Amino acid sequence: MSTYAANTQVNVAKSKAEIENTLQRYGCSGFMTGWSENKAMIAFQINERQVKFLLPLPNPSDDEFTKTDTGKVRKPEASHRVWEQGCRQRWRALALAIKAKLEAVECGIVSFDQEFLAHLVLPGGGTVGEEIIPMIERGEMPKLALTS
C-alpha cells in the first residue's frame, strides 16, 4: 500500500490554510499553529472544546532523506527536497484526517467528543491521549464492570 499524498506538490502553507478553512466551515472559533524541533502543532477551539494535534515531522538527518534507495548518499540539496516532500505528505495527511473527523461528526456517525477524544485539551495543557495512552501501555486500564 502506498503512502497517502506521497508525491503531493501541495506546499505546507497551503495545507495549513486548508485546515484552517475547513475548521472555519465547521464552526471553529479559534485556530493556531506552531512548530518546535521535529514536530508541528495545530490547536483550535470548537463546540466549547479545545483540541490539539501534534504532527511529528520527519528528521532531516534520517537515512530515508540522506540516502537513496540503493544506499548512495544524497547531495544536501537533494536531501532537503526529499525531506520537504515528507513534510508536505504529513501535512496533507493531517488535513485529510481532520476533514474526515469533522465530516463524521457532521453526519452523525460519531459525536464530537467521541471522534476527537484523544486530542481534547485538559486543564493542564496536555491532551486526553497524552494522559491515557501511557496508562494503557503500562497496563493500568480499569477493569470493565459488566452488568447483566
Image (cartoon, rainbow, N blue to C red):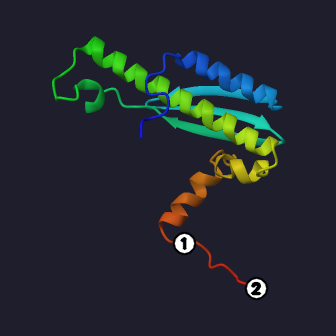
- Residue positioned most to the front: 1
- Describe residue 24's horizontal placement relative to residue 17 as left or right: right
Name which residue lies at 29% across and 14% down: 78
Residue holding disc 1: 140
Q: In x, y percent, where is residue 38?
A: 43, 31
In depth, the one of 45 and 111 nearer the eye is 111
Image x and y of residue 48, in percent: 84, 42
Q: Is residue 141 left or right of residue 75?
A: right
Asked if marks 1 and 2 touch (Cβ < 8 Å), the reply is no
Q: Is residue 114 above or below residue 46?
A: below
Question: Which residue, given by chain and number where applicable, does mark 2 sit on?
Answer: 147
Task: Tell me the residue at 15%/24% (across/down).
Answer: 72
Residue drawn at x 57%, y 52% as measured from the top left: 130
Classify the position of the C terminus by image quarter: bottom right
Residue 83: x and y in percent read 37, 23
Say which quarter of the image contains residue 144.
bottom right
Q: Tell which circle, 1 or 2, labels the residue nearer the N-terminal end.
A: 1
Instruction: Kindly tell me whether residue 122 is visible in this rendering.
Output: no
Circle 2 packing at 10 Å, graded few (<14), some (14-19), many (20+), is few
Q: Comparing marks 1 and 2, which lies closer to the viewer?
A: 2
Report the amino acid beneath label 2: Thr
Label 1, label 2: how far apart the Cα atoms are? 21 Å
Front residue of this view, candidates 95 and 61: 95
